[in-house]
């Protein structure tokens, strides 16, 4: 009996540091989400995790992947898997792009720098948001590989023009224009908490922060947060660069141009010489209009359920859009990606790549840069395992016959 016990006892090597231990035990993105929830103050976690109104669109974005199942093939030599793909003429390690997320330093003081470095290590593109808390130039210093710049169209068009020029000078390859934020979606978790960016310090925030010491120490050491690429140019100057605590709804209403329309897109074509992706396409008709305008890519996206409640899940929209314009533009399926198998389904249904925000933000919130590495590692290994278990050896061989609608 003693012999059996001795041969079956296996202790994990004890690691110093609670985060390291928890990270080693995490098995998937959902586990990183749980870790992030423990480390971040409630308001910060809800800012990342939450979405518009009843959050049905958020839930549906992810659950819609389960509407498809695989048609696996066996007894095909899958001893070597090539996960790479070509996106806008450039080879990337696997078909995933890190989506733009504003105010990333709220999750961890390294913010966009941590995420941009992790993306470079993973060999996939990183998209810096206009509302980034590290500037266009700061991010370019730590990522010499594939970088995209996301544009919100400010009322101050001069500012937009300047930012685009700076992105081109700093080596960003692709311009991603987000078009689903004409007005701000009502994110009710933030409304209930009176959440502002940066967070306002009140009694409730102090209590919350005291219960999250690791986040609080990191946040206080990190220096003031602001929209680092945005200069304060408005004449009344009171909301400006995001260094004052404001609700994001208040900020976007004051700063962003709700009158933006299709004709404005042409201006970007004239100014930007690399690929242009329109992010926030939510129906086939708009996909056609954008393709007719000659953009290079469309991100089928409802902003991770944070804008219009009731917008279709990107994976559900993908097959009809691929039928309509898939031969003219690259399609990117953005939203609800929590597994590598979700990426396989997106590629099988016609996307060149998938895109995601929360998957890496949970990693960042859980453990900073190491957490982002872990999140991207999960997505890539799950992607490769899923290909192998489907009897497919490369991204190039992924095809529509690999998936079927679940019964
Ligand atoms: C915290 C957070 C901030 C975001 N900020 C931006 C942004 O600044 N610009 C933008 O185009 N999209 C933004 N998005 C939307 C993401 O780019 C992406 O569309 C969304 O996260 C996809 O859904 P997923 O989180 O389920 O992957 C944000 C999303 C989150 C969660």
Image (cartoon, rainbow, N blue to C red):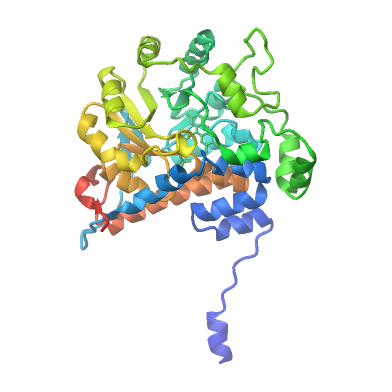
Q: Quadrant of residue 205?
A: top right
**Residue 308: where, in percent of width, then height?**
45, 34
Residue 320: name its quadrant: top left
Q: Residue at x 64, y 40 (%)?
A: 192
**In the foreground, 377 or 366:** 366
**Quadrant of image for the N terminus:** bottom right
What residue lies at 27% left-to-right and 47% top-to-bottom? 394
Query: Where in the figure is residue 242, as x and y percent of width and height?
Result: 65, 23
Looking at the rendering, which quadrant does residue 283 occupy?
A: top left
Residue lying at the far bottom in this picture: please name it. 1
Image side of residue 100 versus residue 229, left or right: left
The residue drawn where x is 48% and y is 15% is: 164
User: Which is more toward the observer, 1 or 312?
Assistant: 312
In this rendering, the answer to whether 355 lies above or below 183 is below
Work out whether residue 135 can be spotted.
no
Residue 281 visible in the displayed image: yes
* Image location (x, y in percent) of residue 4: 53, 87
């Amino acid at each position: 009996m003693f012999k059996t016990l001795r041969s079956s006892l296996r202790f994990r090597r004890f690691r110093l540091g609670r985060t390291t231990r928890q990270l080693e035990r995490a098995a998937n993105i959902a586990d990183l989400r749980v870790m992030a929830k423990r480390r971040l103050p409630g308001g910060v976690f809800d800012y990342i995790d939450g979405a518009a109104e009843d959050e049905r669109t958020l839930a549906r974005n992810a659950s819609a992947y389960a509407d498809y199942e695989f048609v696996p093939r066996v007894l095909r030599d899958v001893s070597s898997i090539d996960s790479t793909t070509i996106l806008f003429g450039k080879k990337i390690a696997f078909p995933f792009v890190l989506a733009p997320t504003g105010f990333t330093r709220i999750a961890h003081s390294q913010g966009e720098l941590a995420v941009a470095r992790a993306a470079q290590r993973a060999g996939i593109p990183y998209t810096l948001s206009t509302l980034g808390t590290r500037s266009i130039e700061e991010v370019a210093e730590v990522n010499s590989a594939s970088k995209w710049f996301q544009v919100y169209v400010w009322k101050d068009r001069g500012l937009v023009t300047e930012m685009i020029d700076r992105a081109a000078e700093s080596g960003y390859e692709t311009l991603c224009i987000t078009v689903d934020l004409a007005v701000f979606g009502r994110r009710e978790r933030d409304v209930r908490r009176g959440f502002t960016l940066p967070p306002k310090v009140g009694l409730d925030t102090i209590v919350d922060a005291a219960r999250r010491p690791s986040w609080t120490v990191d946040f206080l050491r990190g220096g003031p947060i602001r929209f680092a690429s945005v200069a304060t140019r408005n004449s009344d100057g009171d909301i400006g660069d995001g260094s004052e605590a404001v609700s994001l709804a208040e900020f976007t209403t004051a700063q962003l141009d709700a009158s933006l329309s299709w004709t404005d897109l042409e201006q970007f074509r004239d100014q930007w010489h690399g690929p242009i992706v329109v992010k926030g396409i939510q129906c086939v008709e708009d996909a056609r209009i954008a393709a007719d305008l000659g953009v290079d890519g469309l991100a089928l996206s409802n902003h991770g359920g944070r804008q219009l409640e009731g917008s279709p899940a990107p994976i559900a929209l993908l097959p009809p859009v691929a039928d309509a314009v898939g031969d003219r533009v690259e399609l990117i399926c953005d939203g609800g990606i929590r597994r590598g198998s979700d990426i396989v389904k997106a590629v099988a249904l016609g996307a060149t790549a998938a895109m995601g925000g929360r998957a890496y933000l949970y990693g960042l919130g859980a453990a900073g840069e190491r957490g982002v590495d872990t999140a991207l590692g999960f997505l890539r290994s799950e992607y490769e395992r899923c290909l192998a278990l489907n009897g497919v050896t490369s991204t190039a061989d992924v095809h529509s016959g690999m998936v079927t609608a679940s019964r």
